[in-house]
Amino acid sequence: MQNILRIATVIMTCLAVGYLSSIVTQENIPTWYANINKPSFNPPNWIFAPVWTTLYVLMGYAGGRIWNKIGINEAAVKKAFLFFLIQLALNALWSFLFFGLHNFMLASIEIIVLWLMIYETMLQFKKIDKVAAYLLIPYIIWVSFATLLTFSIWNLN
């Protein structure tokens, strides 16, 4: 039961971070975001909510799997979970920089740091639970795309 509660706690935390990030995003979509230049490969707005919800659930499940290994290797789990929390905070920060401050340059720099933290999180997770690391693959792929999109928007504006 404790294992399920840990997984559920991390999933809910990730979804809560996503929800809080979406507040600044949603209020800017119909106004500011609608009026900036975007590349031809910019996805339709409706796709972001289901993609991010799925990614937050996968991320949370992966993090919960790692937390459940705390009794096996506490030091490694704490280190991996620290990277996990850092990347989660950076994930939220990007929305604030891009949609809140409308700062393409800072958002572009920050998303590179986010990508690096996701990658490091995957490496740390892989030492503990390979499945948890693999669960982050869709996330790093999406953030890779988001990096290209962020830089393209910066370039166009």
Image (cartoon, helix red, strand yellow):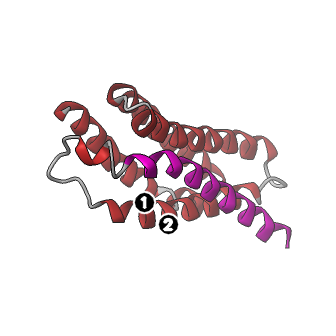
Q: Position of residue 52 (x, y in %)?
A: 46, 59
Disc 1 + disc 2, Cβ < 8 Å: yes
Q: Mark 2 — residue? A: 54
Q: Is residue 70 left or right of residue 97?
A: right
Check residue 147 in the rendering and tell me which mark sits there, or answer none.
none
Question: Mark 1: which amino acid?
Answer: Pro
Q: Mark 1 — residue? A: 138
Q: Position of residue 70 (x, y in %)?
A: 80, 53
Question: Mark 2: which amino acid?
Answer: Thr
User: Does residue 114 sit above or below 21 in this rendering?
Assistant: above
Q: Earlier in the sequence, mark 1 or mark 2?
A: 2
User: Does residue 50 sit above or below 108 in this rendering?
Assistant: below
Q: Mark 1 to mark 2: distance in Å?
A: 9 Å
Q: Position of residue 108 (x, y in %)?
A: 35, 31
Name the quadrant containing residue 2.
bottom right
- Name the main secondary structure of what is drawn in magenta: helix
User: Does residue 86 sit above or below 139 in this rendering?
Assistant: above
